[in-house]
């Protein structure tokens, strides 16, 4: 227990001394052809809160969804509140700056109250742009490593955030 507390304390001090903390609103966008090409046209958007810690070129973070929006041509639209904290997306990766623009990539897993979901590892690749001193916007595509051919380029995220 002492080792866990000491490790946590070292990480917190390192982030406070050398790192940056950011919060963002993330939108995961999916269309029906991801699920089934013969299905009725469908668009789903999952809104999440993203907390990220950056140390140099490396970052790690947690996202939790809070709202789900769905639109189908035959069923209409539906918006549902999702209790935050039931499902988490934990990720770690890096970014490569090019002035105000940057490339971003990371690997993540879904974590629920039942534990880690090991059969769903996600690769996220994209780019971002700094907006002023503290703001940023990112656009990425996601691919499930278990089925890269059918998922890459079909799931997207758009995030607006603020770096403290």
Image (cartoon, rainbow, N blue to C red):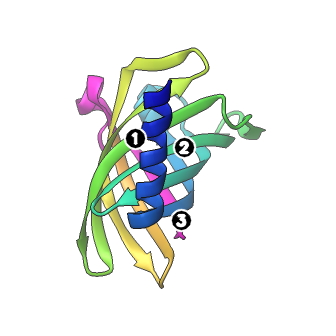
Q: Is residue 64 visible?
A: yes
Name the residue located 47 percent from the left edge and 40 percent from the top edge.
8
Q: Is residue 76 above or below residue 12?
A: above
Indicate the quadrant where residue 38 lies.
top left
Camera-side residue of 134 and 8 = 8
Q: In the rendered image, which residue does mark 3 sit on?
A: 160
Label 1 and label 2: CA atoms lie apart by 9 Å
Say whether marks 1 and 2 touch (CB < 8 Å): yes
Q: Position of residue 104 (x, y in %)?
A: 30, 57
Q: Is residue 29 left or right of residue 92?
A: right
Say whether marks 1 and 3 touch (CB < 8 Å): no
Query: Which class describes the residues within 10 Å of circle 1: few (<14), some (14-19), or many (20+)?
Result: many
1 or 2: tag closer to the N-terminus: 2
1 or 3: tag closer to the N-terminus: 1
Rendered image: mark on residue 63: 2
Q: Position of residue 88 (x, y in %)?
A: 55, 34
2 or 3: tag closer to the N-terminus: 2
Number of numbered markers: 3
| Residue 93 colored in magenta in the image | no
Q: Position of residue 23 (x, y in %)?
A: 57, 60
Label 1 and label 3: CA atoms lie apart by 17 Å
The boundaries of the magenta stretch are 143-164
Secondary-structure class at tag 3: strand
């Amino acid at each position: 227990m002492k080792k866990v507390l000491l490790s946590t304390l070292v990480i917190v001090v390192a982030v406070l001394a050398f790192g940056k903390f950011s919060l963002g609103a993330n939108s995961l966008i999916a269309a029906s052809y991801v699920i089934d090409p013969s299905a009725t046209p469908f668009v789903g958007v999952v809104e999440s809160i993203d907390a990220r810690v950056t140390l140099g070129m490396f970052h790690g973070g947690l996202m939790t969804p809070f709202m789900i929006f769905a639109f189908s041509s035959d069923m209409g639209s539906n918006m549902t509140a999702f209790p935050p904290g039931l499902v988490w997306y934990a990720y770690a990766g890096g970014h490569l700056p090019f002035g105000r623009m940057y490339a971003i990539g990371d690997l993540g897993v879904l974590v629920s109250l039942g534990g880690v979901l090991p059969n769903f590892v996600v690769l996220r690749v994209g780019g971002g742009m700094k907006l002023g001193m503290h703001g940023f916007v990112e656009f990425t595509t996601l691919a499930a490593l278990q089925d890269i051919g059918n998922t890459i380029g079909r799931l997207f995220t758009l995030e607006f955030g603020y770096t403290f």
